[in-house]
Amino acid sequence: MNINKCMWQNCLCVILSHTFFFAHVKIDSMKALFNFWKKYSFVVLLAMIVASLFDFRFALAAILCMVSPIAISFFAGRFWCGNLCPRGNFFDHVMKRFSAKRAVPHLLKSVPFRIAVFAFMMTMFALGIRKNWGNIAGIGFVFYRMIVVTTLVGIVFSFIWTERTWCSFCPMGSVAALIAHFRKHPKPLSVSEKCISCGKCARVCPMQLHPAKYKDGVIKESDCLRCGICAKACPKDAISILGK
């Protein structure tokens, strides 16, 4: 009886230890994959643009980039924009080298301008889909045109202002920011009392936000991309994810 009990206990210990081991390995693998994607996902954007020249249906993959930022915003704000978006990654790793590093005009960040851009782009998009309804390649071309034109706009604005200028009024990003504004994030970024208001966080923020003004509180910025750049730049480790 005691022998059987010991055997079952040993088996349980072995099972639990293996479970924790593989769970740890899986978490490490996911982190490695996330870091790899965050560093090189801009290649996906470039590959899709080139591949679509041969078959416009490849551009239909852009549907994911339209739906994902909105879906994720319900529980993680603009996390997609700062960590998973291939075009955002392109701006961060390519256009940042050529950015003018100038302040983005308030007009481009204003609500009326963002509404106007959203309305115009969605109208053009809807008209294009309607015209090509039933033609998959034609619909693919509508997506392709939208990707190329908006990326070119982002590139031009990078030379004039900063690499993430486009993200200040990106239609999908604006919708995600609106959702984030009304939904309380379960793990918001916080700025502790250790903050010395040195301004380093503001200088590196791709959206030109000022985390230091939320010292000893939570960062209440719906356009925060949750990229973590400000936290890495903080010399006092004052910025962190609350509840992490």
Image (spheres, rainbow, N blue to C red):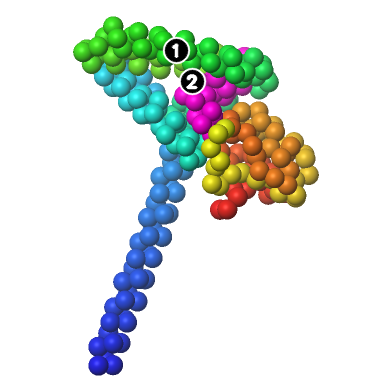
In the image, which residues are magenta?
158-180
- The correct choice, above or below, for 98 with respect to 242 in the image is above
Residue 209 lies, with reference to residue 151, above or below; the image says below
Identify the residue shown where x is 47% and y is 24%. Answer: 172
* Magenta span includes 60: no
Label 2 sits on residue: 171
| Residues under numbered marks 1 and 2 in contact, where contact means CB atoms less than 8 Å apart | yes
Locate the N terminus by quadrant.
bottom left
Question: Left of 75 or right of it: where is 45?
Answer: left
Residue density around tag 2, few if under 14, some if 14–19, many if 20 or more, within 10 Å: many
Magenta region, mostly helix, strand or loop? helix
The local secondary structure at tag 1 comes to helix
Q: Identify the residue under disc 1.
A: 121
Alpha carbons under labels 1 and 2: distance apart: 8 Å
Is residue 175 shown in magenta?
yes
Q: Do we see residue 39 in this rendering?
A: no
In primary-sequence order, the first of circles 1 and 2 is: 1
Label 1 Cα crowd, 10 Å radius (few <14 / some 14-19 / many 20+): some
Residue at horizontal 73%, vertical 47%? 216
* Closer to us: 222 or 59: 222
Q: Percent from the top left, x then y, of residue 147?
A: 40, 17
